[in-house]
Image: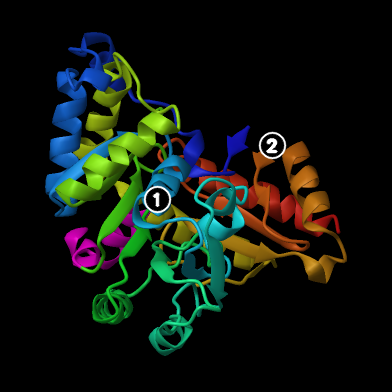
């Protein structure tokens, strides 16, 4: 079975497994796990922030950011199909007590003028705007890269109005690889950032939340409140360190495989609807008069796994554990399936 559902399905490499076995550990709640401390220090350095916190998942990292930046009754501004709004089970309302104000983006990028117009004025009828959230790369925009220029203008608006900017950078290293620039090209224009180590980088578990020292000190308490204070967590921080330090440079390979798949899907008669910049390809199967669920099920029977992305949309995601030969095999199998409709 060729699994193109997500880059989260990658398995840890042998180097990661060995690192986990040999990890020096201690109680992280006491701040005594040297492997975690090493990971957090390195992550802060790479991301260009003062401090960093190892968290269990990207969603936990995003939620801790909202909880730390905001207070109940605040409003956060975010893109209408962003992960925080679309895929995190309403957690910002359930946990932080904040409401969302969504702005439709162009390939995930919000118009800075609309953001500034959406910032609440001082009025007893209105909630205070507590946070601006960006997503880079943008999942539901097909792995689109938010331009640095867009982030820079939005960040300046945030600074002007004293509103922090958080970046859900689950796949931010993919954005960095796509423009062939260090990740700080993006993180220079945000107050805090979350990055996943368990997607394209291949770690078995874990994400990083980075920002200023005072922010991370407060975030650490929120992590504890959410049950995220772990003990000998160096066992998972060690493979995460390998992912962070050894797997970033190869992300462009996933992008090349995505282009290879895009070409093959187009040739097979499928309509690729996104501009493929990174490792995500989205196709529309409506012209075959079938649903995305039917297509995904039929494709599974042929030996390829993908995911529905809407009533007639299907997403494919390339990653470390699928090679170019399997991409070619996928194209053959898709051709076979399409010809049967």
Quarter placement of the C terminus = bottom right
Would you say 67 lies left or right of 150 here?
right
Which residue is under mark 2?
Answer: 303
Would you say 328 lies left or right of 146 here?
right
Q: Element type at marker 2?
A: loop
Q: Which of 260 and 95 is in front in this view?
A: 95
- Whether residue 279 is visible to the viewer of this picture, yes or no, is yes
Please state the horizontal and vertical placement of residue 106, each as a whole percent of the image. Answer: 50, 80
Residue 170 tag number: 1
Query: Within the magenta stretch, is there residue 83?
Result: no
Quarter placement of the N terminus = top right
Please state the horizontal and vertical placement of residue 54, each as a whole percent of the image. Answer: 29, 34
Q: Residue furthest front?
A: 124
Residue 244 tag number: none
* Quadrant of residue 13 within the rendered picture: top left
Q: Which of 291 and 233 is in front in this view?
A: 233
């Amino acid at each position: 079975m060729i699994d193109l559902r997500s880059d989260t399905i990658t398995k840890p490499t042998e180097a990661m497994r060995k690192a986990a076995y040999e990890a020096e550990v201690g109680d992280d709640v006491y701040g005594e796990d040297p492997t975690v401390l090493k990971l957090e220090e390195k992550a802060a350095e790479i991301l260009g922030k003062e401090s960093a916190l190892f968290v269990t998942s990207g969603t936990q990292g995003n939620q801790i950011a909202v909880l730390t930046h905001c207070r109940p009754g605040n409003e956060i501004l975010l893109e209408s199909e962003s992960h925080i709004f679309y895929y995190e089970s309403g957690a910002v309302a359930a946990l932080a007590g904040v409401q969302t104000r969504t702005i439709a983006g162009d390939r995930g990028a919000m118009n800075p003028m609309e953001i500034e117009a959406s910032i609440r004025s001082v009025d007893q009828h209105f909630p205070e705007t507590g946070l601006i959230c960006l997503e880079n790369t943008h999942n539901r925009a097909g792995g689109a890269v938010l331009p640095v220029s867009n982030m820079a203008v939005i960040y300046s608006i945030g600074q002007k109005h004293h509103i922090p900017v958080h970046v859900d950078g689950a796949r931010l290293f993919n954005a960095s690889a796509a423009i062939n620039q260090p990740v700080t090209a993006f993180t220079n224009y945000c107050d805090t950032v979350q990055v996943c180590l368990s997607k394209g980088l291949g770690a078995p578990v874990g994400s990083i939340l980075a920002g200023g020292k005072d922010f991370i000190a407060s975030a650490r308490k929120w992590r504890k409140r959410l049950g995220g204070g772990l003990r000998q967590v160096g066992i998972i921080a060690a493979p995460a360190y390998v992912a962070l330090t050894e797997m970033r440079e190869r992300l462009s390979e996933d992008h090349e495989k995505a282009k290879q798949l895009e070409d093959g899907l187009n040739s097979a008669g499928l309509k690729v609807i996104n501009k493929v910049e990174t490792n995500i390809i989205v196709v529309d199967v409506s012209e075959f008069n079938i649903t995305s669920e039917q297509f995904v099920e039929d494709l599974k029977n042929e030996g390829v796994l993908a995911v529905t992305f809407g009533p007639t949309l299907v997403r494919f995601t390339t990653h470390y554990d699928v090679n170019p030969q399997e991409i070619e095999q996928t194209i053959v199998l898709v051709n076979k399936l399409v010809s049967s409709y």
